[in-house]
Amino acid sequence: MQMRDFVVRFAGEGGQGVVTSAEGLAQSSTQVGYHALTFATFPSQILGGPTWTQARISVNPVLAPGDDVDVLVAFNRDAYDAHRQDVRPEGIVVFNSAEFQLEDNERSFGLPFEELAKSTGNNRAANMVIMGALAHLIDMPQEHLINFVEERFNRGRAEDAEVIRSNIEALNLGRTHIAETGFSLGSLAPPEIPEYQQLMIKGNEAVSIGAIAAGLDFYVGYPISPATPILLYMERNLVGENRFSYQVSSEIESITAILGAGYAGKRSMTATSGPGVSLMSEGLGLAWIAEIPLVVVNVQRGGPATGLPTKTEQSDLYGCMFPAHGDVRLPIIAAGTVEECFYGAVKAIEWAEKYQGPVILMSEMSLAERSQNIRKPDLSKIKQARREIYTGTNGYHRYAGDELSPMPIPGSPGAYVANGSEHDDMGDTTHLGERHVQMTERRFSKIKLLEEDDYEHDQPEHSIAVMPWGGSKGPALEAYNTLKENGVPVGWYYTMYLNPLPPKMLEELKKKDLVIVPELNYQGQFSSILRSMGVKAESITQYTGLPFKARTLVEKITEKTNAQLKETVRV
Amino acid sequence: MSKKNPEYDFKWCPGCGDFGVRRALELAVIDRMEETGMPMENNVVVAGIGCSGNLVHLLEGDQPYGIHGIHGRSLPIALGVKMAQPTLNVIVVAGDGDFLSIGGEHIGPQAARNLNICAVIMDNGVYGLTKGQSSPTSLEGAITSSTPFGKLESMTHPLDLYLTLGVSFIASGFSGQPRPLSQLIKQGMEHPGFSIVHVQSPCTTYNDTFIELKGDLKNGIQPSLWDVPEDHDSSDREAAHSLLQQGGVPVGVIYRDTHRLSLDQSVEATWEKAKPKNIEQLMGAFEF
């Protein structure tokens, strides 16, 4: 049987190599020419705790982790018990036979991968034993994996040759071991090798290099799951003259420090998760009222307060769009794929500079930790945005007029007070009603500068549409493609620009009888915002800490579509 | 605000200590500019919230840049400004409530970083703008609008606190002496690291301590202000500690450590190790 898609889940204790196995498999598969993405959940502790990572290998590009597991690699008994039910009936379980035994061997087999690794003289080659076995299951030519090993471990060190030898031996041992069992899942169709240059990258890394590509000068952050990797990336790479990256003592320091830097002319950013955004609330209001460009990345996790630090959810939309007291509605870009993590970061920096104010880039745990192959961005097409800078003499009225005005930078003439109190056009505090009216309208009018033209749409002729946001794009698109194949009359809309929405798109959405919004939160946050804008939107919600399965969405979208069609007939 | 702005209607009460601090700050900045040739636009005043923060709007003559931000956060805002452009002269102006209470969590980190800015703190021992509540520097037992039965907490001793936190330049001054105060502020601005000039700036409406500070010998009141002796070795932490045990309000430089690198210097020292890469190289690391 020829397969086009293959899902492996590695489950065990933190520290057992669960993540590296999945990433290794994904990476080696992309090097062979397949598309791959990983999905990980972690326990919130340093060592141990149940953890699992899934790798999906596919002939075509994929954006979702895959509903069903073809192969479960169980590192211990608990992992087997917890994940067995997700393996499809014809799937196979590979278990660590040095750790436990299974009575039922019909679709499972024991592989003592640690012992086999030890026999090669390299205790760390257990992953390679597993990979050798998996490759046999899907009939992947061994030379692909050997090439991968040779490339990966060729690091210019004296021990390279020995490491490569032992890893290749481990691959062979895994393959031989499984060959004896006679198990096979069929044959994964040969890869359709993309002709363009690719990157293998995680969401958090894509945000980081996107922001740097867009000209980020200044980054300050505070450790928080799942945004910490952005801080670590910046600390190592946003360095040297005229660049700055730094860890401060709280998210309150993060937001106020990047505000100070934004005021002083720098393109500045921080990344955090929900709890950090809560602490940044007042600072975001200050950036809004004082008109200071900055970017906050919110890599969402689940729940209020500490909530679910290592799970995925899309429950911060209200909190990001309306983070502060007073009349504030922040520009929001929500990345839906790893690729959009890159382009969303580019756009967020551009937006902040363009309208001189705070912009929120929303990501989520499932994107942040997802490794995926993406088309390499064309750097020549990325312009480094820069705010309009005031170049006149002193005596400037920074906040004059009802629209954007050039921004003076300390060190050059044009001194003013960036004021968090309501102010007149000089930046001095005022309490006059007409001033507050003028300044409020000025701040909201600037958002129009950010209206974009482009958005995704397909089958716009249907009166019912599916429109996910953020990371639910992947499973929703997979579901939509199935529905389309089956002739279910729904259209597709998608944008990463949640505020402001592309105006043309909003006009189209307003004409629909129903816009179905899959989103990972209880309240149906995006659909309620859409309803407030005159769109007949309804959510499909889920709040388990996990992403949607495409199958669930196919069912629920079909239900909602049928109900709406009946309703329409009745009317 | 270089000239009177009819829309700006904030006023300090007659006799407010902050008038003297404003004058001292203006003198210090002008002195420094004359000495270094630095233009006015290289100065940034980051203000806290409260009566004292309004100083940023009330400066006379040529105007520096200013940020009048949110309550308690002037220090981390200043961190961003300074590290964005280390050649700027960044000055924080804040009161005891803003700096020591809501903003207290930011003093230690800036001290540890030795952020090269100068904080001028106007201490009146009360929340004035909200009409007379107790602040960290109100006396224990003080009857204020929020402590009708007397303040239950002990009084914070800011100078001891700064010394303990490792602030690398600590001076103490009085708003009633603008010229000597301006010299302390100037020294603070010249100090290559985190400097705090803590100023007794009495609130004539809610906590008038002028007489207590200056004394009234005719009525037998000894001044609580006293000059730091000329032979005080401000580079000696122990000597600074002993000085602060003497009570009252010393006027002068308490402590000065000029051996530490400031944050901008420490960062610059990493550049060699950091080996900056351009975006093509950064992206290249993910190619396969």
Image (cartoon, helix red, strand yellow):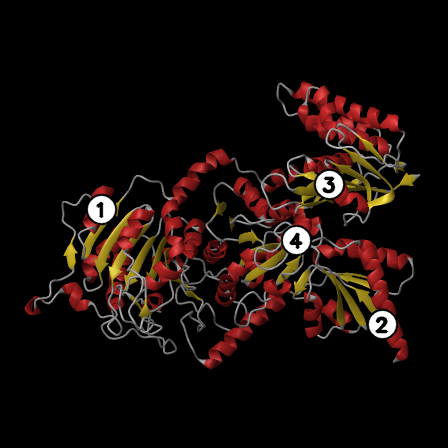
Mark 3 vs 2: CB contact within 8 A: no
Res A177 quadrant in image = top right
Tell me if residue A559 can be seen. Answer: yes
Name which residue lies at 43% across and 40% down. Answer: B268
Q: Where's the C terminus of chain B, which quadrant?
A: top right
The image shows residue B193 at horizontal and vertical percentages of: 33, 46
Could you give the CA–CA distance between mark 3 and mark 2, rounded to whole angstroms?
42 Å
Could you give the CA–CA distance between mark 4 and mark 3, rounded to whole angstroms?
25 Å
Mark 4 vs 3: CB contact within 8 A: no
> Which residue lies under the disc numbered 4?
A364
Mark 1 vs 4: CB contact within 8 A: no
Could you give the CA–CA distance between mark 2 and mark 1, rounded to whole angstroms?
78 Å
Depth order, front residue of A220/B212: B212
Residue A194, above or below B196: above
Instruction: Please report whichever mark, 3 or 2, sits nearer to the chain's N-terminal start.
Output: 3
Left or right: where does residue B29 sit relative to residue A115? left
Res B120 quadrant in image = bottom left
Instruction: Please report whichever mark, 4 or 3, sits nearer to the chain's N-terminal start.
Output: 3
The image shows residue B108 at horizontal and vertical percentages of: 37, 50
Could you tell me the amino acid type at mark 2? Answer: Gln
> Which residue lies under the disc numbered 1?
B240
